[in-house]
Amino acid sequence: MIKVGVVGATGYAGAELVRLLAGHPKVELSVLTSQTYAGKNMWEVFPHLYGMVDKTLEEFNLSDLVSRCDVIFTALPHGHAMPVGHEVMRRGRRLIDLGADFRLKDVDVYQSWYKTEHTASVLVASAVYGLPELNRAEIRGSVIVGNPGCYPTSAILGLAPLLTNKLIDTETIIIDSKSGVSGAGRGLSLKTHFSETTENFQAYGVATHRHTPEIEQELSELAGMPVTVNFTPHLTPMVRGILSTMYGKLTAELNTEELTDFYRQFYKGERFVRVLPAGMYPSTKAVAGSNHCDLSVTVDPRTGRVIVLSAIDNLMKGAAGQAVQNLNVMLGLPEDTGLDFAGMYP
Amino acid sequence: MIKVGVVGATGYAGAELVRLLAGHPKVELSVLTSQTYAGKNMWEVFPHLYGMVDKTLEEFNLSDLVSRCDVIFTALPHGHAMPVGHEVMRRGRRLIDLGADFRLKDVDVYQSWYKTEHTASVLVASAVYGLPELNRAEIRGSVIVGNPGCYPTSAILGLAPLLTNKLIDTETIIIDSKSGVSGAGRGLSLKTHFSETTENFQAYGVATHRHTPEIEQELSELAGMPVTVNFTPHLTPMVRGILSTMYGKLTAELNTEELTDFYRQFYKGERFVRVLPAGMYPSTKAVAGSNHCDLSVTVDPRTGRVIVLSAIDNLMKGAAGQAVQNLNVMLGLPEDTGLDFAGMYP
Amino acid sequence: MIKVGVVGATGYAGAELVRLLAGHPKVELSVLTSQTYAGKNMWEVFPHLYGMVDKTLEEFNLSDLVSRCDVIFTALPHGHAMPVGHEVMRRGRRLIDLGADFRLKDVDVYQSWYKTEHTASVLVASAVYGLPELNRAEIRGSVIVGNPGCYPTSAILGLAPLLTNKLIDTETIIIDSKSGVSGAGRGLSLKTHFSETTENFQAYGVATHRHTPEIEQELSELAGMPVTVNFTPHLTPMVRGILSTMYGKLTAELNTEELTDFYRQFYKGERFVRVLPAGMYPSTKAVAGSNHCDLSVTVDPRTGRVIVLSAIDNLMKGAAGQAVQNLNVMLGLPEDTGLDFAGMYP
Amino acid sequence: MIKVGVVGATGYAGAELVRLLAGHPKVELSVLTSQTYAGKNMWEVFPHLYGMVDKTLEEFNLSDLVSRCDVIFTALPHGHAMPVGHEVMRRGRRLIDLGADFRLKDVDVYQSWYKTEHTASVLVASAVYGLPELNRAEIRGSVIVGNPGCYPTSAILGLAPLLTNKLIDTETIIIDSKSGVSGAGRGLSLKTHFSETTENFQAYGVATHRHTPEIEQELSELAGMPVTVNFTPHLTPMVRGILSTMYGKLTAELNTEELTDFYRQFYKGERFVRVLPAGMYPSTKAVAGSNHCDLSVTVDPRTGRVIVLSAIDNLMKGAAGQAVQNLNVMLGLPEDTGLDFAGMYP
């Protein structure tokens, strides 16, 4: 059994990770840390786990943590995974960071968008961006995986076939994303206060959201040239799910059926990407609780634009599910080990 | 007192109209019709009106209706207002149609998008598109008003200042709209079944929604040249509200503050359009239950695009509230008569 | 114009009060205080009021407040209205307290349930429990009104006809109440965090909620003998509304129709209590946004029990709406001044 | 592999059953029937199953069905399982009916509450009420299992320890239940129309709901004497979950801790019943997506009543999950086979 630790086990991504790892046949939950709830049992904080996970939350102790785990997941705000990265490297363990510290390749870009000094820049070059559908081989041999952000996962999977094949004018890309409230985490704020949030729909971080450079980095890589996009996130009155609606000018004359076929070819054999038949559209409910990313493409002949729709569960394919998928890739396990289930509907 | 009739009083737009007209100091509810509930009292169908509106719903009888009303509101699916238009014209009454029959100036466009023959094309030329902020003078003297669609109201008010002043490249406009479920009406369908809709977010009518030609007609009029757009509506798990997020390339170098000032000038004196101070963004909760349209503009210097956000309550400024505003304009009353209240929050 | 002040204007009850008072034809908003947001304009905190209420929030200054207001509303947690009560009494002004300080007649009971010393016990005897349907005459001449709690309002109005007429066995009363989340206020907590609250239903304060003694005091008064009840509040995933389901053994043989008629007689002429026709049941949506209390009674011949259902909007008839109703009674105005509207539906 | 069939696979209970059975290691989905969607693939009707369940829905053909299945699940409205019962008995197969046809032992009671003739009364005596925690031995050897209703499951598990041990006055029992909307099924109605249901809370079937005799039958069996109750169901604006709040007079002096201990003893070793530690209360979110039933007991010394709270997921422990649990019992498998997971939170 592989010994795993979750740092930040009582945030939403962390708790989802605990739930998935508790059901994973090849791992053993070795350490769970929580700054807020250290000393309590996990089920005292998350009642759905009562009788399912019986494990006391611990203070974060880096040396102790690394000595007791083969693989460590960090599910913390940005800035906290850097020291873990150093220690993991030194002691020959592995790290999957659900935060932003190891996603961006350009440390200056990181520092400019996150307003934080990067203290592990030496590790950045070897860290792998953990989107298995695109970087499977690199993930397999990696020591540090930067688990992608939730919005970037939905956007990059939706646009990859177009960019890889130069089917879209890279100067025309608009990404309009809508997320459930769990994406904002378990920390308290008026923005996530029930009475303010339910029956409400609003944009935030307009033209300034930190997932923008992450999306641009990966799209540029796929396109082989710099790509700049407009990305607008919105808060939707639901718990789970992201739907990204993406627009761009096509560079080739293709109709909806042809482009759908092309997407199905591109993602052939991928267990978690479902390119829907023409006429079906993604919805967040169809992926909630699963590790799926559902995609559709529609060509508008009136404007020459393609509209790509991409749906994920932000806590699963957008965070914890993808982290487990990365673990499976790293360990050479079947990629759906511990993830082999449909979502919950309705 | 002006005698008014509401045809289709038991749909959501119709019922909201009844609620507003019941509180309007200058009108008297003369006739309420309902195909489904004729013979019942209005409060048997809408319990919030118990003790507030005591009026029996009637079968639709065109001749009788017109003889008993000075102004008639039709709140029916498209195709049903045409005969009312003819009769109103013949008998010297007035019509405000909340459906689509008198919005489009080009009957061929209507017939192509709505798959219905237009049997009142002779009336179309004199019918006025009822967006008071842009067409106040024409509405005042009109006999037939085509009350705008909900999505078009949010989109047109959001883009009008840019198009009127040629500040936006008309080939780059994207309108990504999110609506509450009440916009789909009171008719039953899986799409509006609670368990399918709550905790769900999805697009529909991708590249084919019937509000597209209506938006394009008005934007083209404002721009003085043909405008084609991509418009994507989405269903949001809430009852009321539309937020439209709109994108386009600016043709002038303006920053957010300058453009905000320009919008404030453009809508100066408008009672129902609130251009928010820079840093505040529209949200559907801030307008729910009111006739307001809240706007913000953000310039993204990285891409040269403007992001316009526009929020309305789809049943108010997007339907019944705007219809009452049009009535007030027609009758020469202060425009906020019967509409002079803030929304409900939270 | 009567000059009014709202202390605690930025809680949900306070903000609702501001909205109602801004639309009230006989009052002028003189002072709004807020501990958290002093110095900001009201609309910066509550965006629905942008363009509707233009008033800067002030620090609480008791002497200044009382000198500038004829009537003061306190919308604060318990314990804060006592000094205001003293000052109002001394200076000949009037107070409507939306908190708990002037509801309970027995200061010991207050101190035992609220764990707070009562520093204005001398005022308690003359303070009036502000349920106009039952205490109208006393409210008219009062200086201090204790505005009822939200749960007690729904429960007492629902049970009053039975207790006043000894139709119910007072030892068998169960009150099972379900509230929207706005009842928990605008303060942040995990209990009101969107992702924890939506798609969730739970009880709280089982057998210990502070509204219990308030309910028992008023029911005992109506019954002319001590009444003890079981009261269980629940948190419901919605913003506004309380539905109380109440059970008790009937002491007389009455059927549903007879008891319904009896309730209609009891509340005859009451503007805000709607006893529904047999076969219609209250729902929170039918009263949301209005000052109504909707009631139904059902007799179960199998068990000899009556089931009373009572629905209110907790921020309206359960707080701010009732406070305005009390103001109208105090001032001798028609009781629905500023409250004469139906709720918002759907 | 056991061959199973699901009759009525496209209702919510049926679809949940398909999801569970698809992940069950010992069964093979042999036949799925649907009246409405025969000819379509299951994933065309339930998009979360795309790529997970690839099976065409069939018309219901009784003879063919029974010949192709070892165990049949009927997930249909009452009245439809009777002929299946006859055929299953004749051909030596087994039936788990998620409807009401085999729950009530007294055919007259069935016919009186369900207004339907019972055409399989000869089978009723041998059918077993499928609540494994109470009837495990009988289920093991049974041919026909009447899978309990959702409300009865929550109520009976909550009250069983009290009744079995005569700790409650059987004339004082009140069951106040609150259900998510999925309990009303996938059929369309205004009651389940999103805009009518969200932000709404209401009672229904007051004193007349058909689960009453089922609850009374089982409670009477446990008590060894006739038990009559008041049962009131309510519709809650959420998809999944039932919380039942139950009240009764205790016949012994016990405090909360003692009674909690007693419950823990009573349910010792039960995999799916979680008696929560004193101070923790059940919530529907803590059980959503799992087969758990969470219980708490609180003694109110002021009134001598116990308040029992019981939470389940109505589609899992209240329908499909319990059906799979019954299957496991019938087949002698570990009872959590295919059900061994925590719920989804948040």
Image (cartoon, coloured by chain):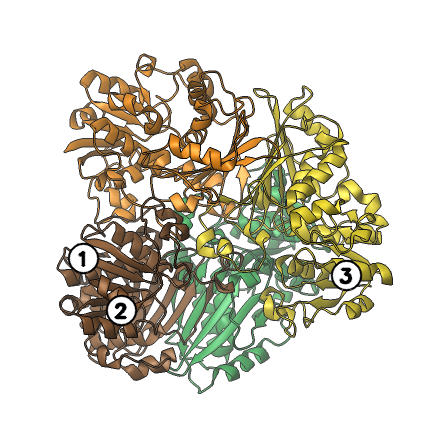
Chain colours: A brown, B green, C yellow, D orange
Q: Which disc number belongs to residue A63? A: 2
| Subunit of label 3 | C
Q: Which disc number belongs to residue A110? A: none
Q: Nearer the viewer, residue D115 or C175?
A: C175
Q: Is residue D269 visible?
A: yes
Circle 1/circle 2 CB separation < 8 Å? no
SS at badge 1: strand
Tell me how far mark 1 sits from mark 2, CA to CA. Answer: 18 Å
Query: Crowding at label 3, few (<14), some or many (≥20) Cα neighbours within 10 Å?
Result: many
What is the x, y in percent for residue C58? 69, 71
Tell me how far mark 3 sits from mark 1, CA to CA. Answer: 65 Å
* Disc nearer the start of the sequence (1/2): 1
Kindly identify which residue carries mark 3. C84
Kindly identify which residue carries mark 1. A2
At x 68%, y 43%, the residue is C153
How many numbered badges does the structure rendering display?
A: 3
Identify whether A52 is placed above or below D314.
below
The answer to whether marks 1 and 2 sit on the same chain is yes
Circle 3/circle 1 CB separation < 8 Å? no
